[in-house]
Structure formats: structure tokens, C-alpha cells
Image: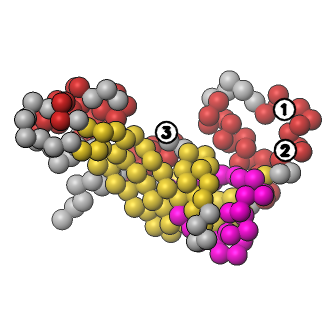
Amino acid sequence: MTDMFAPRDAGDIARLVAEYPLAWLVSREFHASPLPLIGETDDAGTIVALFGHCARRNPLVADFRADPNGLILFNGPAGYVSPGLISKPDWAPTWNYAVLRFTVEVEFVEAETRDAIERLVAMMEKGHWSTDRLGERYDPMLSQIIAFRAHVRSTEASFKLGQDEAPQGFAEIVARHPDRMLAQWMEEQARS
């Protein structure tokens, strides 16, 4: 039996990471930080690593140097689904969401710190801003940061986006939900 809340394919997981890059990185010591991450994929489009950076003073640095195992948690589109959206009087409210949980092994890649910053800026700014504008401030800032690559050991995805709804109810939710991004993700996941 297949999981009805599984994403359609690896591309959906990579897309969620690209569109919602802020994730929680959690160590076994339960230190956690929200950090923007970049998904690195293999030839099949499967995320094999998550690339990012953090402050050297972040407690996660000491934690992952002692034990590289941790979790990365992503929240994608999500929202409450009110019974008021559906014409069925006995329908109960729910919450739709797309989330990812990666079990990872963190490797610090100090030599790639500048690259981590440049790739993130390129992804987020899309050519509208460059680190060149920092001038002399850039190198001192870099000395306070360290890049890491979190190698994916396992992936869990739950894309609960109305797949269990009756066709009429699903159509009503998609048409009436105020979060149009959530509605778009619902429509896309419903396509076979």
C-alpha cells in the first residue's frame, strides 16, 4: 500500500526545500537553529545533502563536532482548513501541510564558507544584490561564519494536501481557501 500523503516524486521534495529554504537544524543535544539551506541533488533529483552556514559561536558547531548526527526539519505550505469552505454540513476542520524531516550527518566545510554565502545570496537575491557591496566588511564577517554540508541519511516527507478529501470537497477547498499558495500545492499534488 502506498502512503497517500507521500509527495509525487523527488522533485517535489527539492521544490519544497527551494521555495521554503528556512529549516530547523537540530543536534542530538537538542540545540536548534533556524537556518536557510540549499538542497544538493543527485542526477535523479533526490536531495543528497543540504548546504548552509552558521555563526561559529552557534552551540550547534560544538555539538556537531562532537557528534555529527542530527535532524533538519522543513515546513512548506500549511494552513487551517475551515468547515466554512465546504458545503458538506458534517465535515470537520483539518490542517493541510507539506513537511520534510531529514536525518543527517553534518560535515563542516570551512573552505566552502564563501561559496555557501554566495550561493545563498544568488538564490535569494536573483541578481538584485551582491556581496560585492559589502566591501571591506565581507572578509571580517566571513571569519565569524562556518559552512557545513548535511549529508542526508534518510528522508521523511508528509504532503497532507487534501488527498483524502472527496472530489467535491477538495474542489471547494481549493477554490475557496484564502492561502492561494497552499491551494496551488494542493492542486499540484492531486495531479497524477
Q: Quadrant of the C terminus?
A: top left
- Give the magenta range: 47-71
Q: Nearer the viewer, residue 154 or 178?
A: 178
CB of mark 2 within 8 Å of CB of mark 1? yes
Q: Nearer the viewer, residue 91 or 73?
A: 91
Residue at 25% in and 38% down = 81
Amino acid carrying label 1: it is Leu
Q: Earlier in the sequence, mark 2 or mark 1?
A: 1
Relative to 31, residue 51 above or below: above
Q: Earlier in the sequence, mark 1 or mark 3?
A: 3
Quick one: which residue is furthest to the left in this view?
Answer: 89
Q: Is residue 20 visible?
A: yes
**Label 2 sits on residue:** 141
| Label 2, label 3: how far apart the Cα atoms are | 26 Å
Task: State the image coordinates of residue 178 (x, y, percent, origin top left).
Answer: 31, 26
**Label 3 sits on residue:** 19
- Lateral position of residue 158 relative to residue 169, left or right: right
Quick one: which residue is furthest to the bottom in this view?
Answer: 66
**Label 1 sits on residue:** 134
